């Protein structure tokens, strides 16, 4: 593996964390959105969602900054190509991030039922739109609609079957991850009815995500042949891993398996897809116009990226672990 | 939509203006929130420390309230900061394409600091009821360090734009070699970073003090309000004289390394020694009008000798001159003027404290403090205008013009419009929420039950 490949792997590690934690976060917003207009009926699931999102909200989203910064530092031409082509969905995702953050920041401290509802609705709706547009960006990259010099088609680059399907898959996968996490949180809090509430939704979202993935595979076949060929060849073990985890999860959730068994399966299904995608587009950052080594920054910069990543592992991971531990303990103390 | 090929110049000129306006606006909005992220933790911890060490319940209550307010401003700041990182690609893709491998690393380091600050902010806010008092205090200390570290990283990147070094370009202008340490520790880092960190402490000190000064003017003269004014005001007043010293040093460095910027700030038209320093006045192409002139002082301030040669705008090529008359000279004067006024405020407080062992209680003192926060923010904005507009037409001094860096994408005026509306709503909502929190604290007499972002659910639930 060259230095550039290692840097690309770091990028994908960031994407993995963002998909797992940020994705679950977005999913929480989706369940908030569909918890029902009836204030009283929606109150309990919303309380479970808020309780598990609140302490980790900010930390989950720093992974996005991490991805952006590593991309523009280690692979500047790719960053430029992506942003100068896909600026429409990227701007819409940024808009969603602003609205979501505002809804979150103000939701808890605002007064008045109407204002609270407005903040809640803003938070929930943007939780669906943001991952959708991020998905279209990923789909457009995988489909090869981003030219290496950038300034590609502003609309037809992402308004295509594959990007839109990937957008849908992002939303569904987040919803499914989130529901799986929430099952555990509800169980910890001893709310049996909420446990089955989110169990049902976890199963539902898993099926929807699976359908998106299957249809997406068909679109991949016609729109992104290079990626499709490698996905069904070199990346096949990862695809199988993801599928097995998905099926295993369906069974485990239905049989009320313990949290320590369910969460790794849920994570495995998502990690399999992300790394499958990585292997499938290797050695390209932008298939098939820009290779990883062509886009890479000089060695000294890549070394700094490695150093920063190493520090992140040493400093950030233990801090995060402390935060997650404290916030999970809060679940126990609270009820 | 028109194609870029048909109207290359008009389109890119229009895009350039729109992109610069959007960048300036979003940066100006975010910079105030980042000051809170940099300097509010230390302010909170001072109150927290007094509360623990002296059993001061008012100080403890202030620390609790400020931490909850900070949760709101931090969440908004995280969002506006994310927007800025998107804007690197959305507005300045060519800049990142060419130099991302050089300056990008500063932001990677900033990312770590921000990450850790976000985590410990959540722990600190969570820890009010759940950690032992001293463990809780110490859980806040990483925020102080990461705030300073984060400011260092971001401002180091900006310093590099002012005094670029640590890279090699090939014939085509592509970066072939990078020396990251030279990038991070470029000559401008030495004065820009402390200037910004002190500015953050001044903004926070005077802003928080001004809120309590307004409360005292409304007749709330209890101990909580006096302490709420005194703690941050002391921090702001300590930072001010140091800031004037750092700013003075910075101006000398700018005179040496970015003569066009310095000439614009000081409205120096003709090169030479024995330059006059003007206090106030209006900058015109023929020099400063309606000002108090102090002969030779400008030359003396630059080189400690009246003979010091200072470059005038006449020696800067016309297409490399920053807008001195309309922006640079007025903002530079405003910044220095406000800094000096805040120094006088400190002398006033120091004098009365020395005489009476108490802060001045007069209406005029409270009025002065109540505008000091807005003044500090205005000075902050002026400082950034000097830094950024003073470098124009360059985005990377001497290497890349801003017009080369801007995006070719359509619709920047449209996104700028959206940003204006969105941020107006965001700013209004933030102020309303903070005011609502403060009113509920007043009514309840304590902040225990008021919820905030990151914090656990309170015992009393409003609404749903």
Image (cartoon, coloured by chain):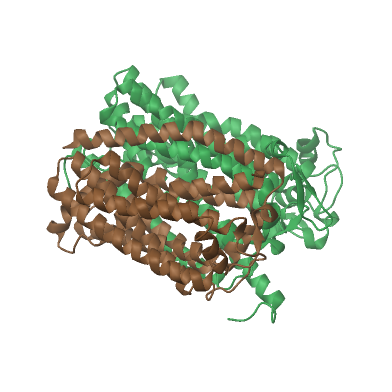
Chain colours: A brown, B green
Q: Tell me: residue B236, above or below residue A22.
A: above
- One can see residue B248 in this view: no
Across and down, in percent, residue B240 comes to 56, 33
Q: Nearer the viewer, residue A334 or B270?
A: A334
Tell me the residue at 23%/42% (across/down).
Answer: B457
Horizontal side of A222 relative to B172 (left or right) equals: left
Q: Nearer the viewer, residue A147 or B334?
A: A147
Q: Left or right: B362 with respect to B151?
A: left
Determine the image quadrant of residue B131.
Answer: top left
One can see residue B455 in this view:
yes
Q: Position of residue A59 (x, y in %)?
A: 41, 43
Task: Give me the residue at 45% from left, 25% from top.
Answer: B352
Residue A57 vertical placement versus B352 (above, below): below
- Answer left or right for B278 relative to A10: right
Screen quadrant of the C terminus of chain A = top left
Check the image and name the residue furthest to the top.
B53
Residue A118 location (% of width, % of height): 27, 61
Q: Nearer the viewer, residue B121 or A146?
A: A146
For image coordinates 55% across by 38% down, the residue present is A309
Residue B185 x, y percent position in the rendering: 69, 36
* Picture quarter with the N terminus of chain A: top right
Q: What is the quadrant of residue B368 in the picture?
A: top left
Up the image or down, B85 lies above or below A85; here it is above
């Amino acid at each position: 593996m060259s230095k550039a490949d290692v840097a690309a792997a770091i990028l994908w590690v960031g994407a993995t964390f963002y998909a797992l934690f940020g994705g679950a976060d977005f999913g929480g917003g989706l369940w908030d959105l569909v918890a029902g207009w009836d204030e009283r009926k929606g109150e309990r699931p919303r309380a479970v969602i808020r309780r598990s999102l609140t302490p980790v909200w900010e930390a989950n989203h720093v992974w996005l900054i991490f991805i952006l910064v590593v991309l523009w530092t280690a692979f500047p031409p790719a960053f430029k190509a992506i942003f100068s082509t896909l600026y429409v969905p990227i701007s819409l995702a940024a808009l969603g991030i602003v609205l979501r953050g505002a809804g979150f920041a103000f939701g808890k401290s605002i007064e008045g039922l109407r204002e609270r509802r407005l903040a809640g609705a803003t938070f929930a709706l943007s939780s669906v739109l943001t991952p959708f547009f991020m998905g279209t960006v990923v789909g457009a990259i995988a489909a090869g609609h981003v030219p290496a010099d950038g300034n590609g088609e502003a609309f037809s680059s992402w308004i295509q079957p594959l990007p839109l399907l990937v957008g849908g898959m992002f939303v569904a996968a987040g919803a499914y991850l989130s529901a799986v996490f929430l099952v555990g949180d509800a169980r910890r809090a001893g709310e049996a009815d909420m446990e089955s509430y989110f169990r049902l939704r976890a199963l539902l979202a898993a099926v929807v995500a699976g359908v998106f993935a299957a249809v997406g595979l068909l679109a991949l076949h016609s729109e992104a042949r290079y990626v499709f060929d490698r996905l069904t060849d070199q990346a096949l073990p990862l695809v199988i891993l993801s599928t097995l985890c998905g099926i295993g999860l369906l069974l485990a959730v239905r049989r009320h398996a313990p949290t320590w068994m369910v969460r790794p399966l849920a994570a495995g299904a998502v990690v399999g897809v992300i790394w499958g995608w990585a292997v499938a587009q290797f050695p390209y950052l932008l298939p098939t116009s820009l290779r990883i080594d062509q886009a890479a920054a000089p060695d000294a910069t890549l070394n700094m990226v490695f150093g920063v990543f190493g520090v992140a592992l040493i400093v950030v991971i233990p801090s995060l672990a402390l935060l997650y531990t404290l916030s999970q303990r809060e679940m126990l103390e609270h009820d | 939509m028109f194609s870029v090929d048909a109207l290359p110049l008009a389109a890119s000129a229009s895009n350039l203006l729109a992109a610069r306006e959007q960048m300036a606006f979003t940066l100006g909005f975010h910079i105030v929130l980042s000051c809170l992220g940099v300097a509010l933790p230390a302010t909170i911890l001072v109150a927290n420390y007094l509360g623990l060490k002296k059993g001061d319940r008012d100080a403890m209550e202030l620390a609790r309230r400020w931490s909850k307010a900070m949760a709101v401003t931090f969440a908004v700041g995280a969002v506006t900061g994310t927007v800025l990182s998107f804007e690197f690609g959305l507005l300045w893709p060519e800049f990142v394409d060419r130099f991302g491998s050089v300056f990008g690393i500063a932001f990677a380091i900033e990312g770590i600091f921000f990450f850790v600050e976000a985590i410990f902010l959540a722990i600190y806010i969570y820890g009010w009821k759940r950690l032992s008092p001293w463990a809780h205090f110490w859980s806040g200390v990483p925020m102080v360090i990461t705030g300073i570290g984060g400011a260092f990283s971001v401002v180091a990147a900006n310093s590099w734009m002012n005094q670029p070094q640590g890279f090699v370009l090939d014939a085509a202008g592509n970066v072939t070699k990078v020396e990251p340490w030279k990038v991070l520790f470029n000559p401008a880092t030495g004065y820009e970073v402390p200037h910004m960190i002190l500015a953050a402490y001044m903004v926070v000190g005077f802003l928080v003090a001004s809120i309590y000064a307004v409360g005292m003017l409304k007749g709330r003269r209890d101990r909580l309000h006096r302490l709420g004014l005194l703690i941050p005001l002391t921090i702001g007043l300590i930072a001010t004289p140091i800031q004037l010293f750092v700013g003075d040093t910075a101006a000398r460095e700018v005179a040496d390394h970015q003569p066009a910027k310095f000439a614009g700030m000081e409205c120096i038209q003709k090169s030479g020694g024995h330059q006059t320093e003007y206090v106030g006045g209006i900058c015109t192409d023929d020099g400063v009008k309606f000002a108090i002139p102090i002969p030779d002082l400008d030359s003396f301030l630059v080189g400690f000798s009246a003979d010091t040669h200072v470059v005038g705008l006449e020696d800067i090529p016309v297409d490399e001159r920053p807008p001195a008359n309309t922006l640079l000279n007025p903002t530079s004067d405003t910044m220095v003027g406000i800094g000096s006024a805040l120094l006088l405020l400190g002398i006033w407080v120091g004098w009365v404290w020395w005489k009476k062992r108490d802060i001045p209680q007069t209406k005029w003192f409270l009025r002065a403090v109540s505008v000091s926060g807005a003044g500090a923010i205005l000075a902050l904005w002026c400082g950034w205008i000097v830094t950024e507009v003073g470098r124009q037409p360059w985005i990377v001094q001497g290497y890349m013009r801003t017009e080369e860096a801007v995006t070719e994408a359509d619709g920047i005026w449209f996104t700028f419009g959206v940003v204006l509306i969105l941020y107006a709503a965001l700013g209004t909502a933030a102020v309303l929420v903070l005011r609502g929190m403060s009113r509920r604290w007043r009514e309840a007499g304590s902040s225990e039950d008021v919820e905030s972002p990151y914090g656990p659910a309170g015992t009393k639930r409003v609404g749903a």
